[in-house]
């Protein structure tokens, strides 16, 4: 091999070769990459600034991108060429701010928030970036001059669906707010090659298609191969004793992958700040294992490569129910190992004293997915940086904070000791030691209480030996927070009671929020204009100012304008659904929307029972058409592919929709739509058009919800249980502007303790019985009773989330909704008050709370 060609490291097929993991950049390409460039050129350390935007300038840059970026002429270009050229044009206007923000952050050396999240449900980027740069009008006019309708190009973008639902969307809202608030932040995550699946329906059943969001090019990302990180897996640990008697342990992995970062811009709202989202992609360490290759087994050599690259191949489509799969643990460790290494070795100055690490970073753990970062930091400090254990533990405890997102026991992540030890042997040792020392602390605080010690152990013994990740996060984290007041309280009292007794000061609440930029300003342009005309534009970054709207609730002409906005949003939505899904929906009816992941605890079946009972009331003549408040119900929901009952519920919703929509007796009075593939893009169209927001989870099960906040901010009234952030929404908007129903959490507990039997509710509630009987008869499935049996039997015999128990209360609340909607002036007044009083639910406020309660403490 010549002097210049890099030597690929070769792993021999027999004994594992020791590899130094994450200690240096992979040697293979280092010489070709070279060191950072130094020169005295005057433009070397400031960006070449894009000239101030004019329409002419924008056209010129756009055409330049088409010619020199896409290699095509406008007259020859495809839609995709045009979209990519437009995206790259917009990107240019962000670039100087991005480079400057980076330079400023390096210089200032402030404390950074490292947001660790396995999911970011970003939504489309083009619109958001046009908004952030204030280029919407310029770009629209520039495209018009080129003969292009910008809306067509917007529609060309496939949203990066790198998350399942609420948790991933929360991370996206948080990084948006942190940029708008100019908080030094790095969002760390995984660049899945395939995000959440694309949902279609065949014969009313969900079919999953791969989401190949990268296939037509991805103009918003910047690969940085020079910042690749090597990550190890498997192997064993070796302990040696030095001359002075100190022991030193070292992990010898037996296989490695490379993490390649892709950087995404996270622009603040017109403030010159662009933060970075750094998502990791897995690559094989060696293009080929030369020994296998030379032995003639080409396929085997390639397979090893494919194996490594599987790690970031696909997002697990489970929401709330982790599967405990090996690849999932590989993903988790992969991205946190890359992220910690990136921050410690590539972001901090080379001579940084790591004893001061907590002054420079706080890693916020978005649920338990990144919790393996805790033993990883211990390993880095103890094994690699020579810290004593206690010193390392002191630092580690101050570098992490943990956000819990659930109350469902089945959603609390555990990893079997067998798997963890096989994949990450050194981390398992570290976890054991953390646990030993922690349990000693428990014994000291509660002498003689061995039951408590066993309850609190990070290691569970049954049904198999496993590591409880939420406990590990609680032991190590400086703070633990729930995501709404009720949730944080239940977290303290029900999920982690022993821990909150031991460390009451560790527990805190930060109620979730949503970004007003995407979910109001971008999604609801008409409402935004009305708001800005009425109270000025400050609300976009100071959402509490929506309060100034309150007096206008009593202004008849404002109400008229507000109704116009809703009406036009509905028209826009129905035009879209006609093209997108072939749906035809009546303009005048109340628009009642339930969009969120399909899960039993969220109770889409309860909504379905309401629809069937309305339908039955009409066709049986119990309710005359003129007594009915016309409704259109829209569902949007993906079910995890392996969650059979959820998929049966989807089938049933589609079946009911088919029959109801085709029945002339209910035409114009009741329609049901279930557009496929609910995602951020669809949410942005649906929510601004909604009159009624369905937030009907069983009390005590929904940690917070954020969909509920988006709806309230867009002037929908909520029908909801006393659950999650609904509690706070109701308190803020006022009882009279919220439709409450159902059991409270303590009532749920009592009911369960008394022995809940759904069949009894069915027997004793005539309206419920009629409704379920109609479904069970096969009326909605062409007479096929078998097809509805899974859902019906589950409701009658299990009903784990007590839909039947809340049925009567729900129907009663829905009749209050009907009555209220019949008075448009009063309804509009309530809707305006929902907007005016929901400023609290800005994710900017959530970020202020994190800063105050967690990151600065
Ligand atoms: C906001 C949002 C969610 C979360 O909705 P919830 O009703 O809080 O469960 C899920 N998916 C998408 C696409 C969202 O925008």
Image: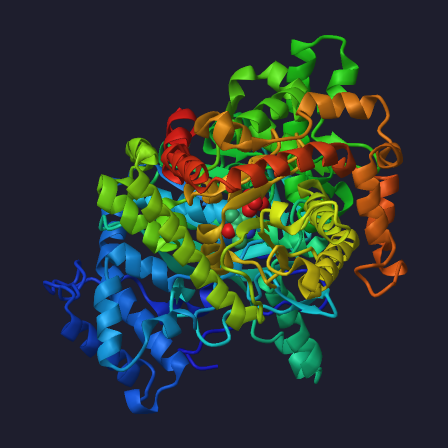
Residue 655 location, quadrant = bottom right
Q: At 59% from the left edge and 62% from the top edge, which residue is drawn? A: 677
- Give the side of residue 723 with respect to residue 570, left or right: right
- Give the side of residue 349 with respect to residue 20, left or right: left
Q: Residue furthest top?
A: 447
- Give the side of residue 674 with respect to residue 396, left or right: right
Indicate the position of residue 243 as horizontal and vertical percent values.
57, 34
Q: Nearer the viewer, residue 16 or 622?
A: 622
Indicate the position of residue 91 as horizontal and vertical percent values.
29, 65
* 186 versus 311 height, above or below: above
Q: At 51% from the left edge and 72% from the top edge, which residue is drawn? A: 579
Residue 154 location, quadrant = bottom left
Q: How is the image coloured?
A: rainbow
Report if residue 116 is visible in the image. no
**Picture mark count:** 0
Q: Residue furthest bottom?
A: 76
Q: Nearer the viewer, residue 118 or 534?
A: 534
Q: At 83% from the left edge and 66% from the top edge, which residue is drawn? A: 782
Indicate the position of residue 51 as horizontal and vertical percent values.
13, 66
Q: At 26% from the left edge and 69% from the top edge, which residue is drawn? A: 140
Indicate the position of residue 575 as horizontal and vertical percent values.
47, 67
Report if residue 19 is visible in the image. yes
* 504 versus 431 height, above or below: above
Instruction: Specify the quadrant that holds the C terminus.
Output: top left
* 218 versus 535 height, above or below: below
């Amino acid at each position: 091999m010549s002097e210049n060609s890099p030597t690929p490291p070769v792993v021999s097929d027999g004994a594992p070769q020791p590899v130094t993991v994450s200690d240096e950049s992979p040697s293979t390409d280092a010489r070709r990459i070279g060191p950072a460039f130094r020169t005295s050129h005057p433009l070397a350390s400031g960006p070449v600034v894009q000239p101030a935007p004019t329409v002419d300038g924008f056209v010129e840059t756009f055409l330049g991108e088409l010619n020199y970026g896409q290699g095509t002429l406008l007259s020859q270009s495809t839609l995709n060429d045009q979209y990519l050229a437009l995206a790259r044009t917009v990107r240019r206007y962000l670039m100087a701010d991005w480079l400057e923000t980076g330079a400023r952050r390096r210089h200032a050396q402030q404390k950074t928030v490292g947001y660790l999240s396995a999911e970011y449900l970003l939504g489309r980027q083009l619109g958001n970036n046009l908004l952030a740069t204030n280029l919407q009008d310029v770009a629209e006019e520039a495209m018009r001059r080129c003969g292009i309708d910008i809306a067509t190009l917007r529609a060309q973008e496939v949203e990066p669906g790198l998350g399942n639902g609420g948790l991933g969307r929360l991370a996206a809202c948080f990084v948006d707010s942190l940029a708008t608030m100019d908080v030094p932040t790095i969002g760390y995550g995984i660049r899945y090659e395939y995000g959440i699946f694309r949902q279609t329906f065949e014969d009313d059943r969900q079919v999953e298609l791969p989401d190949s969001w990268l296939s037509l090019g991805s103009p918003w990302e910047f690969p940085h191969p020079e910042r690749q990180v090597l990550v190890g897996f498997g192997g064993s640990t070796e302990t040696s004793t030095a001359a002075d008697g100190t022991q030193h342990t070292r992990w010898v992995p037996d296989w490695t992958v490379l993490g390649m970062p892709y950087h995404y811009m996270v622009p603040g709202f017109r403030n010159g700040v662009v933060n970075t989202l750094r998502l990791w992609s897995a690559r094989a360490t060696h293009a080929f294992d030369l020994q296998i290759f030379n032995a003639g087994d080409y396929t085997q050599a390639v397979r090893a490569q494919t194996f490594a690259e599987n790690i970031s191949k696909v997002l697990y489509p489970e929401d709330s129910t982790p599967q405990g799969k090996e690849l999932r643990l590989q993903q988790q460790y992969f991205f946190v190992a890359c992220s910690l290494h990136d921050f410690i070795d590539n972001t901090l100055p080379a001579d940084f004293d790591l004893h001061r690490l907590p002054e420079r970073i706080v890693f916020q753990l978005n649920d338990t997915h990144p919790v393996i970062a805790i033993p990883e930091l211990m390993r880095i400090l103890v094994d690699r940086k020579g810290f004593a254990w206690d010193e390392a533990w002191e630092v580690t405890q101050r570098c992490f904070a943990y956000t819990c997102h659930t109350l469902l026991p089945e959603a609390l992540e555990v990893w079997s000791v067998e798997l963890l030890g096989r994949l990450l042997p050194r981390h398992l040792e570290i976890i054991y030691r953390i646990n030993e020392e922690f349990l000693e602390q428990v014994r000291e605080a509660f002498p003689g209480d061995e039951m408590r010690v066993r309850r609190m152990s990070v290691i569970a013994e049954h049904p198999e030996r496993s590591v409880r990740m939420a406990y590990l996060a609680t032991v190590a984290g400086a703070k633990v927070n729930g995501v709404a007041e009720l949730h944080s309280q239940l977290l303290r009292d029900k999920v982690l009671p022993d821990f909150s007794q031991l460390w009451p000061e560790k527990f805190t609440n930060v109620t979730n929020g949503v970004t007003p930029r995407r979910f109001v300003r971008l999604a609801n342009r008409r409402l935004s204009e009305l708001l800005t005309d009425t109270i000025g534009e400050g609300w976009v970054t100071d959402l509490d100012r929506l309060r100034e709207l309150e007096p206008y609730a009593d202004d008849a002409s404002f109400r008229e304008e507000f109704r116009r906005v809703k009406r036009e949003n509905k028209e826009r939505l129905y035009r879209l659904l006609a093209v997108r899904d072939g749906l035809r929906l009546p303009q005048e009816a109340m628009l009642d929307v339930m969009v969120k992941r399909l899960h039993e605890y969220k109770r889409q079946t309860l909504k379905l029972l309401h629809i069937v009972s309305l339908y039955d009331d009409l066709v049986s003549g119990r309710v005359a058409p003129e007594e009915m408040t016309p409704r259109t119900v829209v569902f949007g929901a993906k079910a995890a592919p392996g969650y059979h009952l959820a998929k049966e519920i989807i089938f049933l919703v589609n079946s009911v929709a088919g029959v109801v929509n085709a029945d002339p007796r209910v035409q114009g009075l009741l329609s049901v739509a279930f557009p496929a593939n609910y995602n951020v893009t669809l949410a942005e169209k649906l929510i601004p058009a909604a009159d009624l927001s369905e937030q009907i989870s069983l009390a005590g099960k929904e940690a917070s919800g954020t969909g509920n906040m988006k709806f309230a901010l867009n002037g929908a009234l909520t029908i909801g249980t006393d659950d999650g952030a609904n509690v706070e929404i109701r308190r803020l908007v006022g009882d009279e502007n919220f439709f409450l129903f159902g059991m409270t959490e303590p009532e749920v507990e009592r009911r369960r303790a008394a022995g809940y039997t759904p069949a009894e509710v069915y027997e004793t509630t005539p309206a419920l019985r009629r409704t379920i009987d109609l479904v069970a008869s096969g009326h909605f499935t062409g007479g096929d009773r078998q097809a509805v049996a899974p859902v019906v039997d589950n409701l009658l015999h299990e009903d784990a989330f007590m839909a039947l128990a809340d049925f009567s209360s729900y129907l009663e609340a829905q009749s209050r909704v009907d009555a209220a909607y019949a008075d448009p002036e009063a309804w509009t007044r309530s809707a305006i008050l929902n907007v005016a009083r929901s400023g609290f639910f800005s994710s900017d406020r959530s970020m202020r709370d994190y800063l105050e309660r967690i990151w600065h403490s």
